[in-house]
Amino acid sequence: MSIIYFLIGCSVLLALAFLSAFFWAQRSGQNDDLYTPSVRILLDDEQDPAEDK
Amino acid sequence: MPFIVIPGPYSNPQFWIIENPKMTESILSEKTVCYHCGEACLTTRYTIAEKQFCCQGCKAVYTILADNNLCTYYNFNDHPGANRNRLDKRFQYLDEPGIMKELVDYTDEQLTIVTLYIPHIHCSSCIWLLEKLNKFNPAIYYSRIDFLKKQLNVKFNPAAISLRELVELLYDIGYEPLISLQDVIKKQNAEPKDNLVQRIAVAGFCFGNVMLLSFPEYLGLSAFEQSFKHFFGWLNILFCMPAVFYSGWEYFSSAYSNLKNRVLNIDFPLALGIAVLFLRTVTEVIAHTGAGFADTLCGLVFFLLVGKFVQRKTYHHISFERDYRSFFPVAVQVITDEGEKPVPLAELKVGQRIILRHNEIIPADAILLKGEALINFSFVTGESVPVSKTLGEIIYAGGRQTSEAIELEVVKPVSQSYLTQLWNNEVFARGGNNRMETFNQRVSKYFTIVLLVIAIASLLVWLPNWQRGLAAFTAVLIVACPCALALSTPFTMSAALSIFDKNLFYLKNTAVVEQLAGINTIVFDKTGTITAPADSHVGLNGYLTDHQKQLIYSVCSNSNHPLSRMICHYLGNLEKLPVVNYREVAGMGITASVGSHEVKIGGGRLLFHKHNDEADATKVLLMVDGVYLGYFTFRQHYRNGLKRIAQLGTDYKLFLLSGDSNHEKDELLSVFKLPERMNFNQSPQDKLDFIRLLQQMNARVMMVGDGLNDAGALKQSDLGIAVTDNVNNFSPGCDAILDGRAFDKLPQFLRFAKNTVSIIHVSFLISLTYNLIGLSYAITGLLSPLTAAVLMPLSTATIISFTSIATHIAAKKRNLL
């Protein structure tokens, strides 16, 4: 049953990794604007100018 | 056929702009809309490649976009542009280093970063175009939009493009930034960062892990698994540390500072609960006497913080804190010996001569020296029909010049002007809250005292057995920890807020809902608040044949005067006849010939060579071929639902405060019942004083206003509501912003707010019931961690679901959903 010590250690480490990933995302401003990217992704990049109306 | 303006309060001679465009372009018979902005096109004058534009401005924007191969802009949405009649750009002040420094976020030789607020951002085309600024000028490295905040963040090379050129580019493509020193952006970005989200994340992380580790204990551990028990216990303590000292720390600091100020608020029992939970968990684990309450502790902190998060509602595009500085210009053109020079407003001195062009705002009380002043005071009073001023007259700050350039001499400094001195009143100095105490604050005082009494009593009861006594004492503090109570208000209020939000009523924060329920007196402003500012009501006294209507329409459609526009609008889209000998005389009216008919439209002086000044409302007289046909009247029209407002009179005292003269007194009597409840000719200061007087008579006053002249009253009142027809536009500082379209729902809002408060009361009773159940275990001193761990989330879940369902039902009942 000592394997439980190891497993708990692993699970805590994994959880900490996710927590720090969330902190990093928050600090680097990824959650500041939650709306615009959803629109931006739908805009096509370049079109041939001839197609422009 | 004639035309006359009899001067009413807002009409004024010199109202008429002389203009005589040649009638070469054809008038569109069928309705066409502008390719750029979607407004109706009145002429075919502006056409490129079969695309119609309504004005030169829209056409210019299209040309620029076409030149840069950026017409994809028009593919994403129909008519994405902003209408632009104005073609003047005045951004010279952005070259002043002092002003520039205030505006940019960061600058060095190679890089400048600036965030601009652009009210027109509204669709995906906007995002597409504004993030392609680099195509117009390679010196712009980066441009990013925050759509909800309507902000554009730009990084550019200041050596290659100046801030002024950048703003002019934005202006050219139809996205004029709103620049003011007391800026919305600065406010929003300066919001204190308290890392609430991070703290929730940490609390949630601890909560999850502690739950996992506590489970084996609840399910029962066999004797040979006891070593795990201690291991789990220690891990639990480890996980509690960040939950208490990082996530929950604010409860301790807040409780401490409140105690120091001799205030008992809900944070005190919460902090006490957290502290007791933590200490008891640590002692139990160290002494091997039990499993402790680690899961209850982490859960408590987590739920409390979630409650805080829910309560914090932000409207990115609305600002509740604006004062006159946020809509006054940043700088004004001053005439000096070396010519015109932009001067920041703060440095404007008495005696300086300033020049104001079309659409600029008068920043300080000044005397008109030169030019024709046609001032729109809609920001100040809500009255949208411009007023004309004669030379030598004092013009109060806050008006917007709507005709040509004028020269003025400043007679008062900006902060001492008739309007702006309102902000020197002590009301504005007194920051923070003079507002009503919320239910939560009132209750938590007694709650804390009762809680402490019970806790100490249970300690004393067991006293010889101090171990059991201490257990009972701590258990009381744990189960009675007002978690559910602390959550009932935020969850109810945030549900209520989003319902108000859906109905175009925007509240500054959740406390406003309770204030809304608590008021007993409502004071209305008149112009712009109970009257709709945009369209005055045009009425025709007299009878016109279809042919005569057509004659008048043909003549009026040549004029840019606001009243002519309204007449055209009133008559509808008639076929236009060719007009000759067109002559428009400022302040008098128009004469013209249509076919064989002679048409005169205007004031009494033009038609009858005499000035008759009987009317209250603005009148425009009509004369065709020397025969007087009647006149048009322009009255403001009341917003829909004024009748429903009148019904409020049974529950509330209604008052009217108007800056205008009393010519509408009789009509309004049906709403306000008693003549003494209507006050006319009120200055901004009078309005403030009136509210204060009502408050001294123990009234809890809600002020409903719209213009800057109501700002003092809005601030002084217990609850200030600003009515606006475009929430992105200016509205004075207030507690709530009401969209004009939802004005008729005001009685429903008031009733719904009352329901919301009742819901809070009921949920308080529910949480109290849970506390009592917990207490019955606690005072025996035999509270098991499992009971606590079940009770706490259960009560929280009950409260959250009850409040959201009840709020929903209440909203349905009031027809708000």
Image (cartoon, helix red, strand yellow):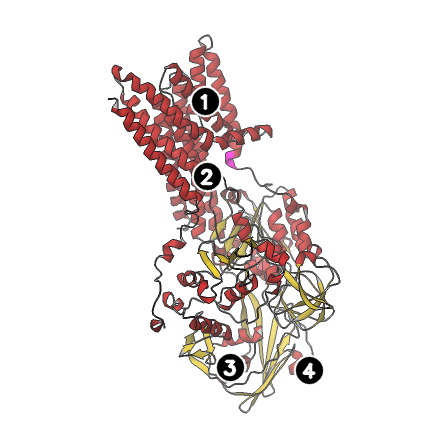
Q: Which residues are magenta?
A: B436-440
Of B91 and B380, which appears nearest the observer?
A: B91
The main secondary structure of the magenta stretch is: loop
Q: Nearer the viewer, mark 3 or mark 2?
A: 2
Secondary structure category for the residue under label 1: helix
Residue type at mark 4?
His
Picture quadrant where residue B331 is located: bottom right
Q: Is residue B534 above or below residue B568?
A: above
The count of marks equals: 4
Which residue is disc 1 drawn over?
B276
Q: Nearer the viewer, mark 3 or mark 1?
A: 1
Secondary structure category for the residue under label 3: helix
Which residue is disc 4 drawn over?
B609
Q: Is residue B31 above or below residue B645?
A: below
Label 1: how many residues lie within 10 Å, few (<14), some (14-19) or many (20+)?
many
**Residue B167 inside the magenta-drawn segment:** no
Label 4: how many residues lie within 10 Å, few (<14), some (14-19) or many (20+)?
few
Residue type at mark 1?
Val
Q: Are marks 4 and 3 on the same chain?
A: yes
Answer with mark 4 or mark 3, whichever residue precedes in sequence: 3
Q: CA distance from mark 3 to mark 2?
A: 65 Å
* Residue occupying the point 47% across, 10% down: B463
Secondary structure category for the residue under label 2: helix
Q: CA distance from mark 4 to mark 1?
A: 90 Å
